[in-house]
Image: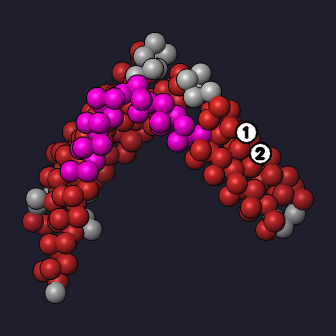
Amino acid sequence: MQHAHKIVYHFWFLYLGLLLMSLGILAILFSSVSSRIQIAYFGLFLILVGLIEGAHVIKMPSISFLILHLFMSILYIAAGILITIDPLGDEAIVTLLHALFFIACGVVRIIFSLEKQTPHRLWLFLNGALTLLIGFLVGFEWPESSLWVIGTLVGIDALMTGWTWIMLSLSKPLRNII
């Protein structure tokens, strides 16, 4: 039974890797459209966070906490609505946020690859290095490339992450990282 469980994990990593690579290729091919979709998703995500923050208000023990969480709820919802209403106008801001996100993810992946004894850690290191490079490139070219850069870079990141997961699925000591 234990052996079958490990095989399921290997296939799960393989299928997720193939799915991520496919989505990455689509995001690259249709970078302008995928950029707008990601901006709209980000706006909807902020609205959802604001609603959750607002629901949390009823549990606050004091008026100062209630005011803080109510203000945060309103701020999240307002930012989400503004982004959702005018996604093209917010692409430059979100592009800059993506640059910072890619830099942070690249650093974390590089550190993880150096600290943990995972199979195919070179792929994880390369994934982190590429993600870090992407972050710096976006930061240097900002804001001129805001119309297409988000979809392209997220596509490249998904492509590399999918490839890393496929490599992990093909390794025998996968149980050490699960």
Stretch of the chain drawn in magenta: 18-43
Can you identify the residue that label 2 sits on?
74
Amino acid of disc 1: Ala
Circle number at residue 78: 1
Q: CA distance from mark 2 to mark 1?
A: 6 Å
Q: Is residue 45 left or right of residue 53?
A: left
Residue drawn at (53%, 29%) of the image:
94
The reply to whether callout 2 and callout 1 are in contact (CB within 8 Å) is yes
Q: Quadrant of residue 159?
A: top left
Does the magenta-highlighted stretch encompass residue 170?
A: no
Location of residue 77 in the rendering, given as x and y in whole percent from the top left corner: 71, 44
SS state under label 2: helix
Location of residue 137 in the rendering, given as x and y in whole percent from the top left corner: 36, 21
Location of residue 124 in the rendering, given as x and y in whole percent from the top left corner: 23, 46
Amino acid of disc 2: Ile
Q: Quadrant of the C terminus?
A: bottom left
Residue drawn at (79%, 68%) of the image:
59
Q: Is residue 69 left or right of residue 160?
A: right
